Image (spheres, grey):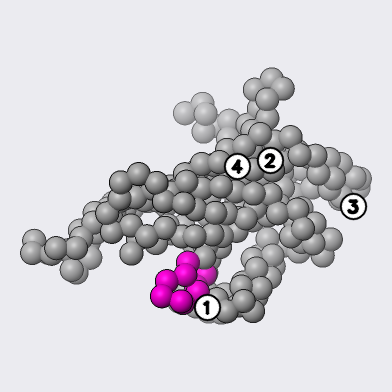
C-alpha cells in the first residue's frame, strides 16, 4: 500500500539521519472509557523511541491490590512524524495481534516543540509533540486458553482506554546528555521503578531484563 511504503521510507530516512542515536521519552496515562468486559487497563507507562522516529520500547505500570508491577515490551510499535504542508503531527502507533487477540495503542499530537539535538558532526533541531492524545484498545476471545470451555462463565476480553502521552523533557534531556542507547534508557526506567517499589511483571529473559517483544495489554 502507498501509505505503508511512505512510512517505510520515512523510517529509513530517520535511521539514516545523523541524530538517530538521540532519544525521546513520553510518559503515558490511561483512563478506561466506554463499555468493557473482563478488561483491566494499565494506569501509566513510558514510551522511548529515537527522537527523529523509529521503533520504540514500552514500559507499562499496573497497581492491583497494593502490588505495583511494571511490564516491558521491547521493539514495540513506532514513533513517526507525518507532514501535510506546514502541519506536522507526531504519531505513536503499536499493534500486537494473533489469531484470537488484538491490542492497539494509537496517539497523535502536533509536533511544535523545538528540541536541540547534537551529533558528532553538528547541532540541529527537531520538532516533537508535547502531548499526544489517543486510545488503547484490546479484544481477545481467549478461545485458545484452557479455561475457555463451553461451560465457562468468565471468558473473553474487550475494552478501551483513553491514552495521553506527554513529552518528558527531563528524562529526555538526561538520557541524551548521558548518551544512553534506547535499551539503556529502558533499563534506567526499570531501575527507577524498582526503587519505587514496583516489581517486574514479566518472566525474566536470559539477560535478566524481564522484557518481551510484540505483546499487548493486560486484560484482567
Task: Residue under label 2, please give it.
Answer: 129
Few, some or many C-alpha atoms within 10 Å of disc 4 (few <14, some 14-19, many ≥20)?
Answer: many
Cα–Cα span, label 3 and label 4: 30 Å
Cα–Cα span, label 2 and label 1: 30 Å
Q: Residue at x 30, y 50 (%)?
A: 36
Which numbered marker is on residue 132?
Answer: 4
Q: Which residues are magenta?
A: 62-70
Q: Earlier in the sequence, mark 2 or mark 1?
A: 2
Cα–Cα span, label 3 and label 1: 38 Å
Viewed as shown, does residue 185 lie left or right of 162? right
Q: Earlier in the sequence, mark 3 or mark 2?
A: 3
Query: Of circles 3 and 1, which is in front?
Result: 1
Which numbered marker is on residue 199?
Answer: 1
**Which quarter of the rendered picture does the C terminus lie within?**
bottom left
Residues at circles 2 and 4 in contact by the CB criterion of under 8 Å: yes
Cα–Cα span, label 2 and label 4: 7 Å
Q: Is residue 76 magenta?
A: no
The answer to whether residue 74 is visible is: no
Q: Residue at x 51, y 41 (%)?
A: 134
Q: Earlier in the sequence, mark 3 or mark 4?
A: 3
Task: Residue under label 3, please give it.
Answer: 120
Q: Residue at x 69, y 65 (%)?
A: 185
Amino acid at each position: 500500500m502507498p501509505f505503508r511504503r511512505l512510512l517505510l521510507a520515512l523510517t529509513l530516512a530517520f535511521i539514516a539521519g545523523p541524530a538517530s542515536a538521540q532519544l525521546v521519552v513520553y510518559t503515558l496515562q490511561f483512563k478506561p472509557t466506554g463499555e468493557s468486559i473482563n478488561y483491566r487497563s494499565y494506569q501509566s507507562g513510558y514510551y522511548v523511541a529515537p527522537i527523529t522516529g523509529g521503533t520504540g520500547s514500552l514500559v507499562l505500570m499496573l497497581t492491583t491490590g497494593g502490588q505495583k508491577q511494571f511490564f516491558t515490551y521491547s521493539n514495540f510499535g513506532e514513533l513517526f512524524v507525518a507532514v501535510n504542508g506546514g502541519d506536522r503531527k507526531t504519531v505513536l502507533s503499536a499493534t500486537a495481534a494473533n489469531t484470537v487477540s488484538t491490542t492497539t495503542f494509537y496517539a497523535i499530537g502536533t509536533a511544535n516543540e523545538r528540541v536541540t539535538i547534537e551529533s558528532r558532526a553538528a547541532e540541529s533541531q527537531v520538532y516533537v509533540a508535547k502531548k499526544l492524545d489517543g486510545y488503547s484498545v484490546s479484544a481477545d476471545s481467549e478461545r485458545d486458553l484452557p479455561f475457555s470451555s463451553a461451560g465457562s462463565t468468565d471468558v473473553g476480553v474487550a475494552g478501551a482506554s483513553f491514552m495521553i502521552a506527554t513529552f518528558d523533557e527531563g528524562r529526555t534531556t538526561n538520557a541524551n546528555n548521558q548518551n544512553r542507547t534506547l535499551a539503556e534508557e529502558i533499563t534506567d526506567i526499570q531501575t527507577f521503578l524498582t526503587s519505587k517499589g514496583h516489581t517486574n511483571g514479566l518472566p525474566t529473559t536470559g539477560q535478566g531484563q524481564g522484557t518481551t517483544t510484540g505483546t499487548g495489554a493486560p486484560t484482567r
